[in-house]
Image (tube, rainbow, N blue to C red):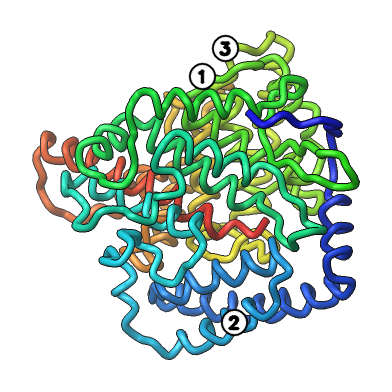
């Protein structure tokens, strides 16, 4: 691990915003103009979703452009992306994006950045693993993380951003690559599939241990959290990040160090703004609430009785907010344009939170003995709303699985119990994993 001196534990974005202004004095005015324009583009994509049209190429271009506006000050490149995005709306057949590239083996047709290609590819690898089909082409694009030395060097470079010097915040890149590697290393089905069928990465036990060691090295022992680091004015500022921490805890199934610190930090920061805390502009948010609930689930056995009581009260408050403020009476979720860029992902994370706290499934209520007699009625409305979206969208399919089976909406077709259980296991794994990966790409953070 690279030795870092003069570490400061920053808890807000002042270093980031200040150093972008140092890189470009007009940064704040420019980024506001681009964000306003991209907001209009997001509205167009949402309208396509409402008409059940999945614009795969346009979505990739939008994600790329949004990343440039959020994490860089590379205006000429952003201008080009915005032009390409606007032109893509006239492209009615965008199905080619679902095919693997013969050039580099990725599924990121509209991307040039490694982390975007990795995100898009992981979704497809989960599907291929479930279908037991090998990728047609070698994954040459994985070269930056193909071996232990390359992986360590690449991650250490992403860990620390020097925004004033480069005009680039590497937070999203680091988070995406860590998330993708964690799935390859820690999810048994995907790991075994990759070892046998994926050409482009040496995913042996030594590689997995080296990646695990890297994660352990960058965990903040004082808070238990993970996050990006920033170099500024001769110091390295270490940021804690809820999203980073959620993904690592989740993919390692709670097998992480410093649980007492991690639990204390999570509880203490309930009122702080994301990415440090749970809140979005002072309010709850289903995505963040889902992250917190998953952390609580894995950390439950490490909590004191008092911490469990307090965590239970917080989950109860989150659930009340979700049902009375985030969800409408018809089962749809209120779209938060400041946090989501997709109606499908908005609904996916609303359902994910309800699923994580066991609202639809009593066996998952690790935090309470309460009963929710109205849950079946709410479930009926939620699934009805999900059925209005494009049925092939992985976020929609995963949300339906997490919502459970509503018998009032199941077609009258006799299927054997054995067949139903087989399809459930196979398809649930495929679409839940795909959605967790793809939906996170639309998180407007």
| In-image side of 133 versus 390 (left or right) | left
Residue on which the image places disc 1: 255
Q: Secondary structure at mark 1?
A: loop
Nearest the eye: 64 or 424? 64
Q: Dot 3 lies on which element?
A: helix
Q: Quadrant of the C terminus?
A: bottom right
Q: Residues within 10 Å of mark 3 (few under 14, many from 20)?
A: few
Residue where numbered disc 2 is placed: 82
For the residue pair 391 and 259, the one nearer the viewer reads as 259
Q: Nearer the viewer, residue 276 or 318?
A: 276
Query: Up-down: is 254 above or below 105?
Result: above
Q: Are marks 2 and 3 in contact (CB under 8 Å)?
A: no
Using the numbered discs, state the Cα–Cα distance from disc 1 to disc 2 in whole angstroms: 42 Å
Q: Is residue 276 above or below residue 364?
A: below
Whether residue 82 is visible to the viewer of this picture, yes or no, is yes
Whether residue 368 is visible, yes or no, is: no
Marker disc for residue 301: 3
Residue 195 percent location from the top left of the image: 26, 35
Per the model, the C-alpha gap separating discs 2 and 3 is 48 Å
- 76 relative to 206 in the view: left or right: right
Which residue does the image show at 36% across and 68% down from the upper left? 390
Tag in front: 2 or 3 = 2
Residue 293 x, y percent position in the rendering: 59, 32
Q: Earlier in the sequence, mark 2 or mark 3?
A: 2
**Outermost residue to the top:** 305
């Amino acid at each position: 691990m690279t030795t870092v001196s003069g570490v400061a534990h920053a808890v807000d974005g002042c270093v980031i915003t200040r150093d972008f202004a140092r890189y470009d004095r007009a940064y704040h005015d420019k980024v506001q103009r681009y964000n306003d324009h991209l907001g209009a583009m997001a509205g167009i994509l949402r309208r396509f979703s409402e008409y059940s049209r999945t614009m795969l190429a346009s979505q990739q271009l939008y994600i790329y452009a949004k990343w440039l506006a959020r994490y860089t000050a590379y205006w000429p490149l952003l201008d080009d992306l915005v032009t390409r995005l606007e032109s893509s709306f006239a492209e009615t057949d965008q199905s080619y994006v679902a095919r693997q590239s013969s050039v580099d083996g990725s599924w990121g047709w509209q991307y040039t950045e490694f982390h975007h290609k990795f995100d898009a590819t992981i979704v497809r690898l989960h599907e291929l693993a479930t279908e037991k089909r090998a990728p047609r082409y070698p994954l040459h694009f994985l070269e930056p993380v193909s071996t232990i030395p390359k992986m360590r060097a690449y991650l250490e470079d992403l860990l620390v951003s020097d925004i004033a010097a480069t005009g680039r915040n590497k937070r999203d890149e680091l988070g995406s690559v860590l998330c993708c590697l964690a799935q390859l290393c820690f999810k048994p089905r995907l790991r075994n599939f990759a070892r046998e069928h994926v050409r482009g990465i040496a995913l042996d036990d030594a590689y997995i241990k080296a990646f695990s060691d890297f994660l352990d090295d960058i965990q903040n022992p004082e808070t238990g959290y993970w996050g990006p680091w920033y170099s500024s004015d001769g110091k390295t500022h270490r940021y804690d990040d809820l999203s980073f921490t959620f993904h690592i805890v989740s993919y390692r199934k709670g097998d992480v160090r410093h649980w007492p610190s991690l639990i204390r930090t999570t509880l203490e920061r309930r009122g702080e703004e994301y990415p440090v805390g749970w809140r979005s502009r002072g309010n709850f948010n289903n995505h963040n609430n889902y992250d917190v609930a998953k952390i609580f689930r894995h950390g439950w056995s490490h909590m004191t009785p008092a911490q469990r009581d307090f965590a239970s009260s917080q989950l109860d408050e989150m659930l009340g907010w979700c049902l009375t403020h985030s969800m409408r009476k018809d089962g749809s979720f209120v779209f938060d344009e400041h946090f989501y860029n997709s109606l499908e992902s908005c609904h996916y994370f609303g359902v994910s939170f309800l699923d994580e706290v066991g609202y639809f499934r009593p066996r998952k209520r690790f935090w309470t003995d309460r009963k929710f007699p109205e849950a079946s009625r709410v479930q009926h409305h939620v699934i009805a709303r999900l059925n209005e979206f494009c049925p092939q969208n992985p976020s929609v399919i995963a949300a339906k699985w997490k919502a459970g089976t509503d018998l009032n909406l199941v077609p009258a077709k006799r299927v054997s119990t054995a067949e139903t259980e087989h399809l459930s296991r196979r398809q649930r794994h495929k679409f839940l994993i795909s959605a967790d990966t793809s939906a996170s790409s639309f998180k407007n953070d």
